[in-house]
Amino acid sequence: MHLIVAEKNISARRIAEILSEGKKLTEHRDAGVSTYSFGDITTVGLRGHVVEIDFEPGYQNWRSEEYTPRSLIDARTIKVPTEKRIVSLLQKLARKADRVTIATDFDTEGELIGKEAFELVRAVNAKVLIDRARFSAITKQELQHAFANTTELDFALAAAGEARQSIDLMWGASLTRFISLAARRGGQNILSVGRVQSPTLGMIVDREKEIEAFVPETYWQVALETGKSGEQIEARHTHGRFHNKAEAEGARDRTRDPLLVTEVKEGTKQDRAPSPFDTTTYIVAAARLGLSAANAMRIAEDLYMNGFISYPRTDNTVYPPSLDIDGILKTLRGSPFRKDVEWTIANRRPLPTRGKKSSTDHPPIHPTGAGTREQLGDDAFKVYELVLRRFLATLAPDAQWKTLKILFGAGGEEYTTTGGQLTEPGWHTVYPFSEAKEVILPVFVTGEKLPIKKVTLDEKETQPPARYTQSKLIQRMEELGLGTKSTRHEVIAKLVSRKYVEGNPLRPTLVGRVVTESLEQHADAVTRPDMTQTIEAHMQQIKEKTRTREDVIRESREMLHAAFDQLEANEQVIGDDIRNRTAEEMNLGKCPVCGGMLAIKHLRGNTQFIGCSRYPECTFNIGLPMAQWGFAVRTDDICDKHHLNFVRLVRKGARPWDIGCPLCHHISSNRESLAEMPSMTPALADTLLASHIYTVAELARSTPEGLAKRLCLPAADAARLVTEAGTMLEKLRRRSECRKFLRDRLIPRKGRSYAKIMEALKGQGITELAALAHAEPGALKNAGIGDAEAGQVLADAKTVYYGQVLREMGIPAVSLKKYLAAGFITPDTFCDLKPETLSERTGMSLGTVQKHVALVCKALNKPAPAKVSKVQSEKGRKELLTIKGLGEQTAEKLILAGIPDRKSLLAADPAAVAAATGIAVQKIRDYQSVLRKKKEIIQL
Ligand SMILES: [Zn+2]
Ligand SMILES: [Zn+2]
């Protein structure tokens, strides 16, 4: 069998579809992984990397004394499978294969993924032939050529990838751990540091500082307005910017009619067709269409996988001679852009344009197949059109402009205006995405006189440098050698997800800035681009086999150790600095009660709340959901009414939960329960808010005297309010207990929400456990709980609720457990059954049970079952023993079950007695019939 290993499932399928050519293609699924077979060939897709490198065991504990952050630099690494099912299927197939072709993406990352597959295959099959197919587009022509001309895996290229992986892990892990520990941050709050990430963030922070330090300068511009042939024309003073106002005013005042045309300069300008797309220029062009860098790459990769465009990760801007441009044009005739393709074919330039960079791995990004909007969807089609039109533009002739520059004189002052007209549209015909605009001027003749309609003097200010947009940043990263064409957009996405930068254009957050500045101050090697550039250069040397992977990693270790020498010496300072400066990011604004500072507080164990800086003098606080529902952070929005920053809960992989203004939220979530208190009126509710009392709990905690004073209320009213609040608080506690009870028992399921169930139960008057314990199954069903689940919930509710009731009546927890286990759940049972029965069934002594029965019956206000004296009980026993066939043992059982004499035996329900004693029902009936006969004689 010939096994082909592709980088992803979708490419495995496409390769099989293309290579099978009429042969029957079958798909098999094995543990969720697909393979595609035709003839003797089977293709299987990986999921990118199926193994990852990690440190040897022991390094996982952040607080380990032995394995310090620095020790991670020299830690040994191991490869661990991350996609176990794919790994085991690959090895299963490899055992049977007599040829394996690695067909992963054709770049450093793809070569490394290929090497990982190579090692997995070799581990189970030492002899199989393994070769490598390289292609830049998943098209018939490319694939056929690649599989007919396979080569060997490029181990040097893979080694460069491996070196990068090791170095990134070592830098990222050791520095992240060091900084986070120094700043005492853990969990979702760690401060990540990375080899490429930190210098990139450094650039954004530097730009922000330039903007802040920028002092705008005022300047003046003089212009005039004239007209010809009904068209308005603006001419600028040739002096340009005036830095002196008086000079500008002088120029303006000297400008006098008439406006004389002193010179007409005509010219032509060649407008070169654009060069082919590499990754960076593609991202920049896609940004103009409104796509973020990460989105642009994701869509391009998708188009590549589906055979519509070539591999989008490339540094090359020169089409290789082997590229079949005629063939591509022929294919593109089948696209919706046929007209433009035909035009290009008819007007083709002799040689396609070329950019500055030529490399041998991939051609520039170009279209490879014909696609329609229906096939691709709107966004992908937009990208496809961009790539296709760019390709056409690189084959189209240059454009020609006619340029016009007119010079005017007016009272000795010189003015000018310029125009441009596209005489040969050339490539603009097929590529409408460029910014070039025509300005068509009327015809002017030297010596001509024109009227001056208006002279203007504008005061302007110089502008600070602009913040980086994503695409500008990617361009700048490329210039500085930061990251690679494949990783740059990912690095930016990471900075955003780690909340180091925000917005577009990008600006640093407070944390992003503080971490950068701390590192700059104490270990600037980490934030300087040159360190990263050095490593990129080393990667190149590995690829060219002039250096080994080990040698490069060793040098990187030395660089990192040097950084740690500085960092460790300043650990305390760095930690304090970051902590002090980032505390601000949790501040929300003034405490409504005391004017202190309200801030989000995160405690251990996922607890978070909003508290006041003047605690314990000020106890104002606002509760927040536990951190597993989302880590609370502040946002830039501010409440108009309370002047507090909004709060948001963020959770990985979930939509953020916006709390909004925490005080508005606090007020609205307590409004209903306050309103439920009997003596609450809207006016009183307003008074409470004005006095900064927001919750029932605060009212319940108040003393009547204190409250009377605070609210200016009569003492009696205040006292009543405190009492009512106490009752309400108890009710709220019971409601929340009921909610928790249900939440613990109802299994989360798609399409049902707890909130809806609670609301439906509330509508039926069920908000507390007591009501739930007595509810009908129908009520639960109405709320959307299924039959089986409802039965279980009700049974549980009874146990929990009556358990609480019995505990309150004084039954100790240990005994309660025994009663519940024996099935005695309701308090009524205690008064209705004989204590002897309870005693026997629970295994507790009769004395203890009688004590409990007395407690319960007293609480229920019911008579306790009469105690039986010793003499009486002896008498009863003797009576029972007179019955024919009733022996000592049976008598004992009956007495324990609460049947102490003949009279009660006659009155008892045989089934119940049988159940309580284990004596056969028929036997009891027999005893009763004997007694009935006797009754006639002895008048019981
Ligand atoms: Zn306060
Ligand atoms: Zn508010």
Image (tube, helix red, strand yellow):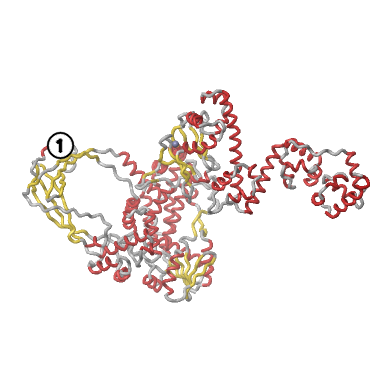
The location of residue 393, given as percent across then percent down, is: 26, 62
Q: Residue furthest left?
A: 447
The one of 833 and 410 positioned closer to us in this rendering: 833
The location of residue 808, given as percent across then percent down, is: 69, 37
- Say above or below: 376 vs 173: below
Specify the amino acid type for callout 1.
Glu
Disc 1 on helix, strand or loop?
Answer: helix
From the viewer's perspective, tell me whether residue 486 is left or right of residue 932: left
From the viewer's perspective, tell me whether residue 233 is left or right of residue 59: left
The one of 444 and 521 positioned closer to us in this rendering: 444
**Which residue is rendered at x = 25% and y = 41% of the image?**
462
**Which residue is rendered at x = 77% and y = 40% of the image?**
831
Task: Answer yes or no: is residue 555 visible.
Answer: yes
**Which residue is rendered at x = 18% and y = 39% of the image?**
457
Which residue position is annotated with label 1? 249
Task: Answer yes or no: is residue 238 visible.
Answer: no
- Please tell me in which quadrant of the rendered image residue 364 appears: bottom left
